[in-house]
């Protein structure tokens, strides 16, 4: 997830673009860059500046080396996906002749093939990004078109038609003094319309200080902004379409949060996209799975006889879910450990052990120290991480990035769901490399994974009763969470979210353990949340959880039941019933977690707490 800004109008473009980037920096801060189009002695030219790190680094560079005044500009704040967070990989990317500049949000899935084609044509790539190919393709396609109004937009359409994956692209050309073009597929782009000026942004926060008049672009559309001809939107085939017009009624602060009260709510809403982006580009043409960086041979992966998953907090819960899936698909034994305990108990590790470390931030000290211990013992380390180029992936032998985008709220939500999905991919990858599953079997499970964004979207549209329930639970002293099988880690995660946000005592239990002690705490009215497995899963597990609901209810509990659509067995025992879509058993945590996030957020909000920055916590815990 990156932030994109474009501007055409009478103001100094650089000022407008930088202001937009400041408001979009929450979308990524691995690097920032700008390009402006200026009149030179021999026609137009582009001037660009870019810098790794936060926007402040770029602003410092621009203060030392200012860019000329201009009325066309583009800008980018980066959340690294392809290629580390370096100056070289920062956007804008320029064509070899420096006459085209492009900024991009998304992942171009077929960039490797396009890159090879360009390299065969003698073009030397200057970055490791998927984006750079667009700058070179635009140059070649533009050169082949006759000089005419709309030439840059036509080039954008032709190039967009060649791209696969997700992209918002904004392109400026030195030969086009009046025109800026952009294109979108599976990635956001909005147009702002001011008085004689136009803005482009990943979201309205980019231009809210200038105008509230916006146009929403549809899927697979190209927008041309021309100083004299105005705004034209077409599909990729060139047919003109009318964009949806709307007026933004948020203030600037709300705009950054996408109109939500909290970043956490915004991030919960972004979960379908986070899952889709994490799956994007993982399946090669022959059905093989693709990891981002694998410094391990297939033979090393075949030699693995034991897996440890090591992580902290919410990431630890993702690891617990991973165990069920990886063991089921690979038949390799998996142990899951909290990172802070791992090295101190001297685990048995050797060359044939794979240690999977999971970390949103990539900087958690406990996890990093566990990783280093594993490497000292010669184990292989695979990182699942959300922050490109952070320490944990850098020190690991292989990396699978979750493409959840930056998570601003301290409580992990979208990165958790993306981690679970990444764990599934690791399980499938290992099963495939070791010949336990054929490519078509893997593809069948991936097809189920691809339904998850829609399923989460469906859950999100039915959350009002959960919010209402949350408001009614704001005075609870304790809330218990029960689950079996993959529902057990979901119960732990539900309890963690509640503790960290609402400061209410909460505990997650394996539902079968309840009778061994914890059931004694249940009193009249104690809220108990139960995550019910699908009745289509092993019959005995579903039936046992239904019995557990009856047991707690018989002791006075107020039962809050999360069950899939069509599961009528739970109806008589549920004081509150939250429905989720039918999902294969192992994948169910991706949908059953969502109501628990909303519940915790609503309870905390009702109690008047700061949901995004709970007391005593930090987003990245860099001490042991
Ligand atoms: C809970 C939460 C924490 C983190 C934990 C690990 O909502 O965010 O429990 O999951 O501190 O952090 P990462 O994943 O960055 O290693």
Image: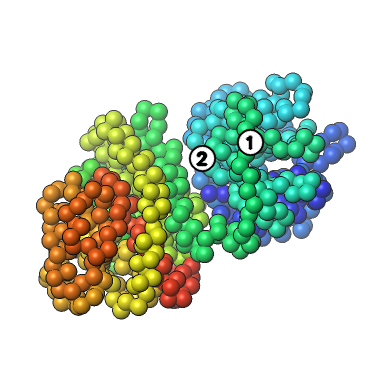
Identify which residue, 191 or 617, lies in the foreground. 191
Question: Would residue 164 be found to the left or right of residue 524 on screen?
Answer: right
Identify which residue, 109 or 305, lies in the foreground. 109
How far from the left and from the top, in percent, is residue 76? 64, 48
SS at mark 2? loop
Q: How is the image coloured?
A: rainbow
How far from the left and from the top, in percent, is residue 583? 28, 45
Number of residue marks: 2
Decide if residue 55 is in sight here.
Answer: no
Decide if residue 151 is in sight here.
Answer: yes
Identify the mark at residue 303; answer none if there is no mark.
Answer: none
Say if mark 1 contacts mark 2, CB within 8 Å: no
How far from the left and from the top, in percent, is residue 505? 31, 76
Answer yes or no: disc 2 within 8 Å of ligand 1.
Answer: no
SS at mark 1? loop
At 77% across and 23% down in the image, what residue appears? 147
Identify the mark at residue 242; answer none if there is no mark.
Answer: 1
* Quadrant placement of the C terminus: bottom left
Does 127 sit above or below residue 517? Answer: above
At 23% across and 48% down in the image, what residue appears? 566
At 69% across and 21% down in the image, what residue appears? 144
Marks 1, 2: nearer the viewer:
1
At 27% across and 63% down in the image, what residue appears? 576
Q: Which residue is mark 2?
A: 186
Identify which residue, 410 or 553, lies in the foreground. 553
Does 142 sit above or below residue 560? Answer: above
Q: Crowding near pointer 1: few (<14 within 10 Å), some, many (20+)?
A: few
How far from the left and from the top, in percent, is residue 463? 39, 58
Identify which residue, 450 or 470, lies in the foreground. 470
Does 381 sit above or below residue 175? Answer: below
């Amino acid at each position: 997830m990156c932030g994109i800004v474009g501007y055409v109008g009478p103001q100094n473009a650089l000022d407008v673009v930088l202001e937009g980037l400041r408001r979009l920096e929450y979308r990524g801060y691995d690097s920032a860059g700008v390009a402006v189009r200026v009149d030179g002695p021999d026609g137009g030219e582009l001037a660009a500046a870019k810098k790794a790190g936060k926007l402040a680094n770029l602003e410092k560079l621009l203060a030392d080396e200012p860019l000329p005044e201009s009325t066309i500009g583009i800008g980018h704040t980066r959340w690294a996906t392809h290629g580390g967070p370096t100056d070289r990989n920062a956007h804008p990317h320029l064509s070899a002749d420096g006459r085209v500049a492009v900024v991009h949000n998304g992942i171009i899935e077929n960039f490797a093939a396009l890159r090879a084609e360009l390299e065969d044509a003698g073009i030397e790539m200057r970055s490791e990004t998927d984006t750079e190919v667009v700058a070179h393709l635009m140059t070649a396609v533009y050169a082949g078109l006759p000089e005419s109004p709309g030439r840059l937009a036509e080039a954008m359409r032709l190039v967009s038609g060649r791209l696969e994956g997700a992209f918002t692209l904004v392109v400026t050309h030195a030969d086009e003094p009046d025109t800026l073009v952009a294109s979108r597929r599976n990635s956001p782009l909005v147009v702002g319309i001011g008085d004689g000026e136009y803005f482009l942004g990943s979201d309205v926060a980019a231009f809210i200080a200038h105008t509230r008049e916006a146009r929403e672009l549809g899927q697979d559309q190209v927008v041309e902004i021309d100083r004299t001809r105005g705004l034209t939107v077409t599909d990729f085939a060139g047919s003109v379409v009318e964009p949806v017009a709307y007026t933004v009624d948020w203030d600037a602060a709300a705009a950054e949060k996408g109109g939500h009260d909290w970043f956490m709510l915004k991030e919960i809403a972004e979960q379908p996209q986070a899952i889709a982006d994490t799956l994007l580009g993982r399946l090669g043409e022959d059905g093989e799975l693709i990891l981002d960086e694998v410094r391990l041979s297939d033979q090393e992966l075949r030699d693995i006889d034991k897996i440890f998953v090591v992580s902290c907090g919410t990431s630890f819960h993702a690891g617990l879910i991973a165990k069920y899936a990886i063991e089921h698909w690979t038949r390799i034994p998996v142990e899951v450990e909290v990172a802070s305990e791992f090295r101190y108990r001297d685990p048995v590790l050797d060359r044939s052990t794979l240690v999977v470390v999971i970390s949103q931030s990539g900087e958690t000290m406990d996890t990093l120290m566990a990783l280093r211990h594993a490497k000292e013992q010669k184990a292989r380390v695979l990182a699942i991480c959300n922050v490109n180029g952070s320490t944990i992936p850098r020190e690991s032998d292989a990396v699978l990035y979750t493409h959840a985008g930056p998570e601003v709220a301290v409580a992990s939500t979208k990165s958790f769901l993306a981690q679970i999905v990444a764990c599934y991919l690791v399980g499938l990858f290992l099963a495939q490399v070791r010949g336990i599953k054929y490519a078509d079997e893997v593809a069948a499970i991936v097809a189920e994974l691809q339904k998850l964004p829609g399923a989460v979207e469906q859950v999100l549209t039915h959350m009002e009763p959960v919010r209402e329930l949350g408001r009614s639970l704001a005075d609870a002293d304790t809330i218990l969470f029960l689950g079996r099988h993959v529902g057990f880690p979901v119960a732990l995660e539900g309890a963690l979210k509640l503790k960290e946000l609402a400061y209410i005592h909460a505990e997650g239990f394996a539902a079968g353990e309840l009778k061994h002690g914890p059931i004694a705490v249940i009193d009249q009215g104690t809220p108990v949340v139960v995550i019910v497995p699908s009745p289509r899963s092993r019959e005995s597990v579903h039936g046992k959880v239904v019995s557990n609901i009856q047991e707690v209810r018989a002791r006075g509990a107020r039962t809050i039941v999360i069950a899939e659509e069509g599961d009528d067995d739970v109806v008589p025992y549920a004081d509150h019933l939250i429905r989720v879509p039918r999902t294969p058993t192992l994948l169910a945590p991706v949908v059953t977690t969502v109501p628990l996030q909303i519940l915790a957020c609503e309870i905390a909000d009702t109690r008047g707490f700061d949901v995004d920055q709970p007391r005593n916590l930090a987003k990245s815990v860099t001490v042991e």
